[in-house]
Amino acid sequence: ARSLSDIGKLSESTIDGIIDFLKTRDMKDGDIVIHYYLLEALGIQKKQGQLVLPVFEEFLEDCWHMSGNKHEGFPLRYAAAWGIARQLLNDESLAEMLSFEKIYQGASHTDSRLAGPCLFSFGLLGKKAQHKIIQLLQDGSMTKNRALLILLTLSDDEDSSLQDILIE
């Protein structure tokens, strides 16, 4: 699974096979690390956003927990959040496909490993997601560092009004 990220561009049939495998996950007997690396491999695929974004959105709320001291948490959520961010970096037109509400839920989460890439995505979305960014700024989870992450990922072409709101 990890090697798939090294291959680069995957065929559409390989991507479909990965998606089918991910959808049949078994939290009791499955291997969460394999699923993590498969999501990561999907995340780096360019021009495949229409195939992979729905999968990432589904995994943003995944409840498969990995126990442990150092790596405890929900790695499939984190991989999905970074997958969305990577897809937006490659093709901003994918914004039309996204559920801003799901990204908002991740961005306002107390776990910064999930919030970080979702905040990054909001910065990439900029004015398209302005209403959700403003809602997020009013949320109790917002900190100066989180607002700064959005601000730093805004495009230079963004209207300065959103930048001004974030700076306040």
Image (tube, helix red, strand yellow):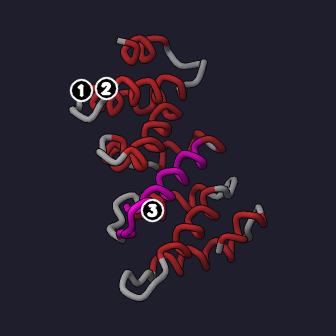
Q: Measured along the vertical axis of the image, is residue 40 above or below residue 154? A: below
- The one nearer the camera, 87 or 95, is 87
Q: Mark 2 against mark 3, which lies toward the viewer?
A: 3
Q: Quadrant of the C terminus?
A: top left
- The disc at residue 75 is 3
**Residue found 49% across the figure and 37% down from its top:** 120
Residue identified by numbered label 2: 134
Q: Amino acid at mark 3?
A: Pro
Q: Are marks 3 and 1 in contact (CB under 8 Å)?
A: no
Q: How many marks?
A: 3
Of mark 2 and mark 3, the one earlier in the sequence is 3
- Say what amino acid the circle numbered 1 marks: Gln
Q: Is residue 17 left or right of residue 32?
A: right
Q: How far, Cα to Cα, is label 2 from label 1?
A: 7 Å
* Residue position marked by numbered label 1 in the rendering: 138
Magenta stretch encompasses residue 86: yes
Position of 111 with respect to 126 (left or right) is: left
Q: Position of residue 4 (x, y in %)?
A: 71, 70
Magenta highlight range: 65-88
Q: Which is nearer the N-term, disc 3 or disc 1? A: 3
Q: In terms of depth relative to the viewer, which is nearer, 47 or 108?
A: 108
Label 1 CA crowd tier, 10 Å (few <14, some 14–19, many 20+):
few
Is 64 drawn above or below residue 113 in the view shown?
A: below
Horizontal and vertical percent for residue 128? 45, 31
* Marks 2 and 3 in Cβ contact (< 8 Å): no
Q: Position of residue 9 (x, y in %)?
A: 76, 62
Secondary element at image label 2:
helix
Mark 3 to mark 1 CA distance (whole Å): 27 Å
Residue at point 36%, 23% (across, down): 144
Residue at image point 55% right, 54% down = 83
Q: Secondary structure at mark 3?
A: helix
